[in-house]
Image (spheres, grey):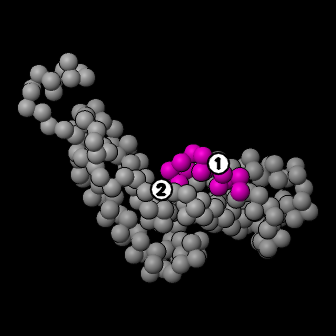
Amino acid sequence: MDFSTPLDEISLAALKRDCRRTQEKVYRDYSRAAWNLAVRLSGSEATAWDAVQNGFVKAFEKIAQLERADRFGAWLRRIVVNQVMDAGRRSMDPLPEHHEPVEADPDHDGALDLVRALSRLDAQDRAVLWLHDVEGLTHAEIAETLDQSVPWSKTRLSRARAKARQWLQAPMYAPAGSDAGTESTNTTKRSMPHGR
């Protein structure tokens, strides 16, 4: 089940009565979509699980504010995004700024580069890019979810795409000080594994 799957009116009424069985069912139905979104936005499984757990607790506590059952998925998505963003503001450290190029591996999977590029984006850029390009939200929906304006969403998406494109077109990177990007004039050393 994903966020676009509507909740029925009976389930919404049961949630408003604090029915634990319905809470468990709703959690089982929506937790996978919530976790996938949270892990993509945060780049961390631990942060994602915390955001999902806190998001469901908050959703169940605030369920009385939700008037229409068919809006539950979008409402829960917004709560999860906000939980991830709050966690990011509290604890997300940027990746190291100093990187050196690494020689490309011929068997390298491009998906790994995409994951690395996404992880290098700041939390808001990553959220806008993911919500628009993967989740399919419009700029108006992103603006509403992140409590921002539509022009802000468009600008952040443009910048995020440009940064990600730049990182994807550049050579792979490794932290400075590693031996991965160092050039060697000794061809024997370069061709042998582990410098032997």
Residue drawn at (78%, 71%), measured in percent from left and top? 66
Q: Secondary structure at mark 2?
A: loop
Q: Residues within 10 Å of mark 2 (few under 14, many from 20)?
A: few
Mark 1 residue type? Trp
Mark 2 residue type? Asp
Disc 2 to disc 1, C-alpha distance: 18 Å
Q: Position of residue 3 (x, y in %)?
A: 64, 58
In the image, is residue 196 part of the stretch drawn in magenta? no
Q: Is residue 87 visible?
A: yes
Give the camera-side residue of 15 and 190.
190
Q: How many marks?
A: 2
Q: Secondary structure at mark 1?
A: helix
Q: Is residue 154 left or right of residue 172?
A: right
Q: Which residues are magenta?
A: 39-54
Q: Is residue 141 above or below residue 109?
A: below
Q: Is residue 172 above or below residue 186?
A: below
Q: Position of residue 173 (x, y in %)?
A: 28, 46
Image disc number at residue 49: 1
Q: Is residue 30 visible?
A: no
**Sequence-wise, which precedes: disc 2 or disc 1?**
1
Q: Position of residue 26 (x, y in %)?
A: 77, 53
Q: Which residue matches tag 2?
A: 93
Majority SS type along the magenta span: helix
Residue drawn at (25%, 35%), measured in percent from left and top? 179
Q: Is residue 75 above or below residue 116?
A: below
Q: Position of residue 156 (x, y in %)?
A: 41, 71
In the image, is residue 42 part of the stretch drawn in magenta? yes
Residue farthest to the front, as pictured: 177
Residue drawn at (22%, 45%), measured in percent from left and top? 101
